[in-house]
Structure formats: structure tokens, C-alpha cells
Amino acid sequence: MRVSRGELLRWQFDLTWSLFDYHLERLEPEDFLWAPASHCWTVRPDVDGTWVPDWAEIEPDPIPVPTIGWVSWHIGWWWSVTIDHAQGRAPRERVEITWPGDGRSAVEWLRGLREDWLAVLDRLTDADLDAAAPFPWPKDSEHTVAHMIAWVNSELMKNAAEIGQLRLLRAASSG
């Protein structure tokens, strides 16, 4: 059986999403802001009540351990910007992408991004997959849209594993 690149990338995304959704379905409201270490990045309301992530332009050393809230914001940030690029829209700046403010809303946001991403994937042709990737590489890169989709799948898998591990650690630490 021969499978096209688009079908393979879609299969990989669906597999990755199913592993991620396993953890999304099991998250408790308290999981999102649980601080797994004293050196931690999270999301918090600013003076206007908008939930913003901890951030540094230059990654600190040691790297702070993120909360599930921070990782869910991070997914929302890179995925929103990738979808903007894939749909030919001007990409939003990092500071324009804020966390929804609670776990349930964050899960709904991520599921909405999945639907937006599926719409992108469903419209792609083989020729589109061979086009230059609009993101996340420099414009003079030789990476294609197929590379970008593979990157999304990999990044989502990494972030899903991070959320899953944090969820399990919190559950184990609370007895």
C-alpha cells in the first residue's frame, strides 16, 4: 500500500493528537498552575487581569521548569503563529497571544487550534507540501511546508509529553 506524504503527515498528527488528548481529558483544574519546582515558569494575571506567561528573550540557565499552564500557553503561541503563516495571515506577536485564564478554557483553546490546523491540512495538495515553508525557518531556508507540518507534529509530541509528565508528577506528589 502506497501512502502519500500528506496522508502520512496527517496520520502522524492524528496519532500525536490522540496521545495529547489522553492527557487533556485527565487534567484537573489544579494541575495547570501547580509549580513542580521553585525555579518555575508559569502564567499569571497582569494588572488588567490578562493571563501572561513568564518569559525571557534570552533563555535562562538553568531553564525554569514550566507549569502545565505555561506549556499550554506555549503550544497556543507557536501553533497560532504557525496557523497564521499557513493561512497567509500576518502572524501575531508573542505578546498578543495570552493564556485563557483557566484549565477548561485552555483545553478548549487547544482543541480549537486543532480544528484550525485540520482545516489547513485538509486543503493542502502535493504541490503545497513542496512549497517553501513560511515558518518557523528563515525565508531563505530549503524547508518545505511538509517540513513545517512534521515540525508541528514533533513540537506537539514534545509538549504533550511535558504536560503528561507534569500531570503524573503532580498526581504522584499529592498522594
Image (cartoon, rainbow, N blue to C red):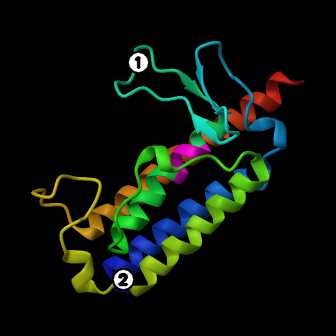
Q: Position of residue 145 (x, y in %)?
A: 27, 69
Query: What secondary structure is found at the residue carrying circle 2?
Result: loop
Q: Where's residue 112, x and y in %?
A: 62, 68
For disc 2, the neighbor class at 10 Å (few under 14, some 14 to 19, many from 20) is: few
Viewer-side residue, 7 vs 2 = 7
Give the number of the mark in front: 2 or 1. Answer: 1
Which quadrant would the C terminus be assigned to in this image?
top right
Residue 157 in sight here: no
Name the one closer to the observer, 19 or 52.
Answer: 52
Residue 47 shows in the view? yes
The front one of 78 and 52 is: 52
Residue 97 falls left or right of residue 20: left
Residue visible at 76% across and 46% down in the picture? 102
Which class describes the residues within 10 Å of circle 1: few (<14), some (14-19), or many (20+)? few
Tell me the quarter of the picture where residue 136 sits.
bottom left
The part of the chain drawn in magenta is: 72-76
| Above or below 15: residue 20 | above
Residue at the spot of label 2? 3
Residue 60 numbered mark, or none: 1
Q: Residue at x 51, y 76 (%)?
A: 118
Residue 106 vertical placement versus 116 (above, below): above
Residue 41 appears at what percent x and percent y?
A: 58, 26
**Residue type at numbered disc 2:** Val
In the rendered image, residue 57, in percent from the top left (x then y), is placed at 36, 28
Residue 112 horizontal side relative to residue 125, left or right: right
Could you say which quadrant of the image residue 107 lies in?
bottom right
Q: What amino acid is labelled 1 in the image?
A: Pro
